Amino acid sequence: MDSTTLLLIVAAVVAAGLLAGAVAVLVRLVRTRRALLRAGLPTGPRWVFWGAVAYLLLPTDLLPDPVYLDDIGVLLLALRSLRAARPAAPGDARLP
């Protein structure tokens, strides 16, 4: 086996691993979308959540990637907006 064949095998294994990871993330995103629809949230907070997911996946950031503070901040803001918009359960006294 020469080096070219070995390189192609390694590249195929890496590509298969990346594909498996992408499929796993896609399945989780679809489940999250269904959960958001079932929760009865208004459209605005759902768009904020999906915007935060897109920001996390896009290669451009406000800060370089070794510093994940901007990614964490965007995700926290999206989660706070989802929590603030969730419907209150009967008898649930939420703080304003």
Image (cartoon, helix red, strand yellow):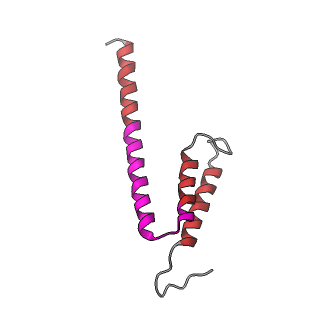
For residue 20, side relative to residue 77 (left or right): left
Seen as rendered, the residue at the extreme top is 2
Q: Residue at x 52, y 73 (%)?
A: 86
- Quick check: 3 above or below 15? above
Q: Residue at x 40, y 19 (%)?
A: 7
Q: Residue at x 39, y 37 (%)?
A: 19
Of 59 and 13, the residue lying toward us: 59
Q: Residue at x 41, y 64 (%)?
A: 35
Tally the numbered discs. Answer: 0
Q: Quarter holding the C terminus? A: bottom right
Seen as rendered, the residue at the extreme front is 43
- Quick check: 38 above or below 17? below
The span shown in magenta is 18-46
Q: Is residue 61 magenta?
A: no
Seen as rendered, the residue at the extreme left is 1
- Quick check: 80 above or below 88? above
Q: Quarter holding the N terminus? A: top left
Of 14 and 34, the residue lying toward us: 34
Q: Is residue 27 magenta?
A: yes
Magenta span dominant secondary structure: helix
**Image coords of residue 15 (percent x, y):** 40, 31
- Asked which quadrant contains residue 44, the reply is bottom right
**Image coords of residue 79 (percent x, y):** 56, 63
**Image coords of residue 80 (percent x, y):** 59, 66
Seen as rendered, the residue at the extreme bottom is 91
**Image coords of residue 89 (percent x, y):** 47, 81
- Asked which quadrant contains residue 58, the reply is top right
